[in-house]
């Protein structure tokens, strides 16, 4: 039996300790519980225990869960978004963390304007230039942000990354530091980085949002 409230409390304590090591206030870090393939009851128990935000990878799965759960906390899209799902994403999510190309940004702007909304977004950065991952290259960020600034349907709140898989969390530190440098140069607020295996290092390097799934909800079904 997975004790979701106990798992959540442990993650929150680990965030607190990591923040203190970095001389930061834990209150400045948003814990986004990634609920991909997690059943509604486990999600409900996490929210009841104080989880402040939920993250989903797919529009269709999020739609079903929001239909059952409503909006007790903000919903973040943290996975790859197909352009043809932009309209649904604008209507469903409070924050879209995975804006990884200009074509998508323009379509989100168009759909947000049609809905009379301004959508909070994060720009995804492919810090290591991995071919298997989406996102802007670090050298593309300045130009991308300049173009996004002209899209009134979007409010760019910060940067997001998924670093390369590494054997230990410490090996991800350099990628997190690189994203922080890009964020600072752009004058943005948020850094979404760090998942179950490395969120403490991400917090030490300045994350303002961490995306944690397995450490809260337990292993996903295969």
Image (cartoon, rainbow, N blue to C red):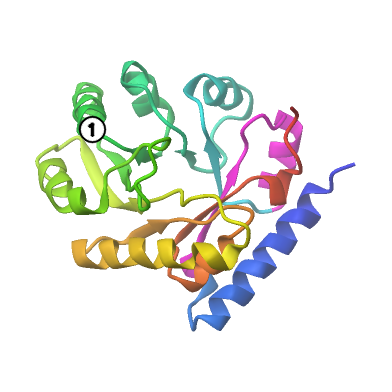
Where is residue 132, by image quadrant? top left
Work out whether residue 31 or residue 146 is closer to the camera in this orientation and state it.
Answer: 146
Query: Residue 8 location in percent, x, y?
Result: 71, 55
* Residue at x 90%, y 41% (from the top left corner): 1
Query: Where is mark 1, residue-wise?
Result: 105
Q: Assign the C terminus to one quadrant of the image.
A: top right
Which residues are the magenta region?
27-49
Query: Residue 147 location in percent, x, y?
Result: 11, 42
* Residue at x 22%, y 24% (from the top left corner): 107
Residue with the most extreme top position:
84
Q: Is residue 44 above or below residue 162?
A: above
Work out whether residue 118 or residue 15 is closer to the camera in this orientation and state it.
Answer: 15
Work out whether residue 53 or residue 99 is closer to the camera in this orientation and state it.
Answer: 99
Q: Is residue 45 magenta?
A: yes
**Badge 1 local density, few (<14 within 10 Å), some, or many (20+)?**
many
Left or right of 104 in this view: 68: right
Q: Is residue 201 magenta?
A: no
* Residue at x 20%, y 21% (from the top left corner): 114
Query: Residue 149 location in percent, x, y?
Result: 13, 45
């Amino acid at each position: 039996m997975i004790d979701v409230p106990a798992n959540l409390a442990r993650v929150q304590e680990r965030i607190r300790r990591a923040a203190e090591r970095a001389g930061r206030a834990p209150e400045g870090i948003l814990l986004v519980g990634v609920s991909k393939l997690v059943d509604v009851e486990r999600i409900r128990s996490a929210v009841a225990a104080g989880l402040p935000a939920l993250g989903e990878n797919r529009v269709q799965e999020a739609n079903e869960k929001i239909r059952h759960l409503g909006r007790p906390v903000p919903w973040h899209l943290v996975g790859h978004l197909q352009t043809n799902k932009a309209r649904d994403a604008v209507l469903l999510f409070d924050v879209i963390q995975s804006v990884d190309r200009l074509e998508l940004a323009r379509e989100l702007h168009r759909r947000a304007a049609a809905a009379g909304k301004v959508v909070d977004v994060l720009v995804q950065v492919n810090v290591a230039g991995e071919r298997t991952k989406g996102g802007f290259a670090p050298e593309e960020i300045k130009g991308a942000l300049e173009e996004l600034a002209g899209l009134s349907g979007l409010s760019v709140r910060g940067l997001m990354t998924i670093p390369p898989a590494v054997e230990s969390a410490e090996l991800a530190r350099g990628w997190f530091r690189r994203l922080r440098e890009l964020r600072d140069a752009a004058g943005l607020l948020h850094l979404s980085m760090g998942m179950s295996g490395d969120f403490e290092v991400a917090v030490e390097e300045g994350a303002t949002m961490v995306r944690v799934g397995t450490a809260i909800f337990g292993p996903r079904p295969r």
